[in-house]
Amino acid sequence: MKNLFPSESCKETQLNAFNPQSWLQVERGKLSKFSSQSSSSIESLIKVPEPPILPFFKPVDYVEVLAHIHEELESCPPQERSNLYLLQFQVFRGLGEVKLMRRSLRSAWQRASTVQEKLIFGAWLKYEKQGEELIADLLASCGKCAQEFGPIDIASQLPADSNTSSNEAVVMNGNEILKTVIFRIGDEKIVCDRQKIAGLSAPFHAMLNGCFTESLQEDIDLSENNISPSGMRAIHEFCMTGSLGEVPPNLLLEILIFGNKFCCERLKDACGRKLASLVSSRDDAVELIDYALEENSPVLAASCLQVFLHELPDCLNDNRVLEILSDANRQQRSIMVGPASFSLYCFLSEVAMALDPRSDTTACFLERLVESAESSRQRLLACHQLGCVRLLRKEYDEAEQLFEAALNAGHVYSVAGLVRLGYLKGHKLWSYDKLSSVISSFTPLGWMYQERSLYCEGDKRWEDLEKATELDPTLSYPYMYRAASLMRKQNVQAALAEINQVLGFKLALECLELRFCFYLAVENYEAAFCDVQAILTLSPDYRMFEGRVAASQLRMLVREHVESWTTADCWLQLYDRWSSVDDIGSLSVIYQMLESDAAKGVLYFRQSLLLLRSSHAKFTACRQHASNEHERLVYEGWILYDTGHCEEGLRKAEESIGLKRSFEAFFLKAYALADSSQDPSCSSTVVSLLEDALKCPSDRLRKGQALNNLGSVYVDCGKLELAADCYINALKIRHTRAHQGLARVHFLKNDKTAAYLEMTKLIEKARNNASAYEKRSEYCERELTKADLEMVTRLDPLRVYPYRYRAAVLMDSHKEKEAIAELSRAIAFKADLHLLHLRAAFHEHIGDVLGALRDCRAALSVDPNHQEMLELHSRVNSHEP
C-alpha cells in the first residue's frame, strides 16, 4: 500500500528534473565517472522522495486502543462485535501486521450478526486470498474442505416477513362484508377471496373492510395500478397458499412493484426471495438491483450486492456497477446492507485505493465512507483516508478540512497531512512549530520526528531523522535521506553502509532502488544488476524513478555493462551467495537462471525457500513449472505445509515417494513430521527419512540443509557425536549455517569457548548475521552477551529477544522503570506478544494493575488463545480496582 501512496513532494518543481535517458546509454564506457558527473546529475539520480502520508489508522498509543477494543469485545452486544474487529483490523493495518489483519477480518466474519455483514467480510476475505485458490483445490484432492468464503444463500439467512393479518369477516354498519371481490383489469375479471386479499396489507384492509367506497363494492377496477391479470391471479394464489409457485421473472418484478405500492410486505418479501434465487451473473445483478432499491427489497438487494463483491476488483471496471455503488443514498445503502454501510465502504475503498488512489472512484467511495461513519473512531479513519486521497489529487482545501476533522476527532497522525499542506502554502515555520507542539504534547513517535525533519535544514534535519530512527527503526525514509546525503558528498562507503543497514532487516523496494542508483552512479554495474533483479523478483511490474521507468527496462540497459554468465557460472554464483547467507544476491542469480532453459521448478523452489525468510514465499510457481508428477507432488506438499495443513503435506510427500524416491520428497516428509509430531519416538523415523534423502541425487545446497537438519535431530536425541559428524560434513560442502548447530554441540559438551568461536566463524562468513550474533550471545559472559545483543539490535531492530534480555537484566537489578522502558522502546513499533507479555508481568510485579491489564488485553488481541497470557489476564483481572 505504501507504494500506492507516493509522496506529495514539497519541492514539486524538481519532479521532472531527471530524464533517465540522459544517462541510460547502452554503449560500454558511455556513462561518465561518478567523480566527474555534475552535482545536478547526481542530485537527480539519487533523489529521495518525501515519505507519503499513509491512509492508515495510526493511534499515538496503539496498545491502549487494542486494549480498549478487547475490553469492549468482552461485554458488548453481539451486533457490535464485527465493527470492533474491523477497528482492530485497521490498527493492525497501520502497524503493517498482515497476518493479524487477516485474522481480525476472519473474526469479523465469524462474529457477523447480520447476513449482510457476513457477505461483506466473506467477500473481503476472498479478496485478500486472491491467488490462493490452489490451496482449496489441493485440500479437496486430499478429501478435506477448505474454509470457503464463497457466495451464501442470503434468502435462507434473512428472516422472512412474519406479519399476519386476520382473515375473519368484519361486520360494518350491521351487515357482513362480502366474501369475495372481483378485480377488473382491462377486459378480464379475477375473482378473489376478499379477506385473504385484505390480509395482504393495511391499505388493502382499509380498502376492502374500511370506510372507503370499495368496501361496499364487489367489483373493483384495478386497471390503472400497473398489474396484469396474470399478476393478479398469482397474487391471489399467494393469498390462498402462501407461495408464489412457478412465476416468470418479468411477472415477479410486476408483483414486487405492486406489492411495494400497496405495502404488502409478505408478498414483497416472497417476490424478493424468488428473484434473489435468479441472480446468477453481474448482468442479472445490475438489472435487478435497481428494482430492489426502488421497491425496498433487502433480500434481492443483498443478493445483487454479493455478486458485485465477489467479482472485485474486476467489477470496478464496469461503469454500471460503479454508478450503483457510488450513487447509493443513505436509504438505498440501508436496503442493501442494513447497518453495515461503513463496513461495505471500508472494503470498497480498500479495493479502489489498491487500483488507483487518485481515481474518482476511490474519492467517491471514501465520501460514502465518511457519510456512513457513526462513531468518532469511524469518522476519524474515514476523514483521514479521504484527506490522503484529496492531497494526492491536489484538492488542498478539501484535504485540509478533512485532516482537521480527523485531528479534532483524535487522530494525531492526521497532523502530518495538515503540516504538509501548510508547507505547500508557504508556511514552513508553522509546520515545524505545529509538529514541535505535537512532540511535546504526546509520547513522541518516530513518524513525528520524520515529519518535522521535512521542515528544517542541515544539522536540525539530521538530528530529527536520527531521533526518528531511534524511536522507530522500521521507517525507511531516514536511512534513505542520510544515505543520499552522504552520496551527494561523495562519501560512497558511508552511503552504502547506511542503506545496507535497513536492507539488512527490511527488504524494502524503495531502498533497493536507491542502492541500485548508488551503484549506477559509481559504475558498479554488477551490483546494480544484482539489485534490479532482486527488485523484479519481489515485484515483476515495479517502476522506478517515481514510476516513470519500468525496472525491467533498466535491467535490460544495465545488462549491456555486465559480463554474461553460463549456466555453470550461475550455479557457482548461487552456491557462493547461498553459502555466504546473501539472500538478495541469491535471489538475483536465481532470477537470471530462470531466463535459461534450466529446470524452472527447481529454481522457483529455491527462490521460494529464500523468500520464506522474508515472508514473500510463493510455492505456486514451482508447481506450475514442475517437470514431472513426483516433483509436482512435492511442491504441492510444501504449499499445504506452508499454509498450516501439515497432514495433507505429508500425504503429498508419501504420494511422491510412491512414484519415485527423491531427495525433496524424503526431505519434505522428514521436515513436516519433525515439525508436527509431539511423539519423541518419531525421531528415529525422521533420521531414517533424512538418511534416505541423502542417498538420493541432489545438489550440495540441499544436501547441506539435510545434513544440518539431521544434526538437529541427533542433538534432540542426545547423540552429540553423530550430530557433530553431520554438522562437520555439512560445513565441508559449505553449508555455513551448520556452524550454529556445531556450536550447540560444543555448548552441550560444556565447552562454551568452542561454541563461541564456532559462532564467530558463522558471523565472519554470513552476510546477514544478526541471528548469528543473537545465538553467540548465549555462549559468553554477561558483558559480551550485552555487546552481541546490542549488535543484533543495530543489525535487525525487529528481533525481540535482545530487548527482552536487556529488560530482564534491568529487572534483576531492581531497575523496574528502565526495564519497562526497554520493552516499551520496541513495543512502540512492533506489536509482539512476548514483549507485551513480559511488560504485563513487570507491571504486575510493581503493582501497576491497570498497566498490566492494558498489556494483557493488547497481547490477547495479538493472540487470543495464548494460554499463559490468558492465565496472567485472569489473575490480573481479579485484582482490578
Image: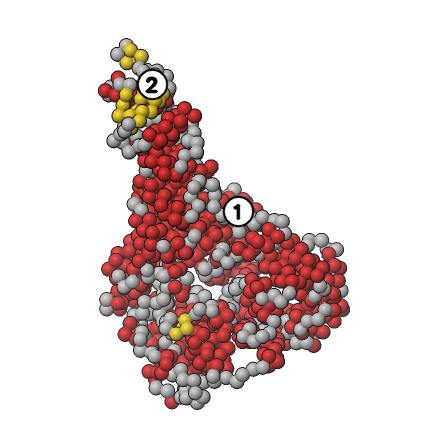
Instruction: Say above or below: 611 vs 675.
Output: below
Residue 38 placement (x, y as % from top left): 34, 86
Q: Which mark is residue 180?
A: 2
Instruction: Say above or below: 285 vs 198.
Output: below
Task: Check disc 1 and report the residue beneath it.
Answer: 873
Instruction: Say above or below: 531 vs 364.
Output: below
Q: Residue at x 40, y 42 (%)?
A: 302
Residue 634 placement (x, y as % from top left): 64, 62
Q: Residue at x 59, y 63 (%)?
A: 623
Q: Nearer the viewer, mark 1 or mark 2?
A: 2
Q: Is residue 262 visible?
A: yes
Query: Secondary structure under badge 2?
Result: strand
Q: Is residue 519 visible?
A: no
Q: Residues within 10 Å of mark 2 (few under 14, many from 20)?
A: some
Q: Residues within 10 Å of mark 1 (few under 14, many from 20)?
A: many
Q: Residue at x 55, y 73 (%)?
A: 594
Q: Quadrant of residue 570?
A: bottom right
User: Amino acid type of disc 1?
Assistant: His
Q: Which mark is residue 350?
A: none
Residue 274 placement (x, y as % from top left): 42, 37
Give 276 or 433, whichever is nearer the viewer.
276
Give 244 or 650, whichever is nearer the viewer.
244
Give 860 or 401, whichever is nearer the viewer.
401
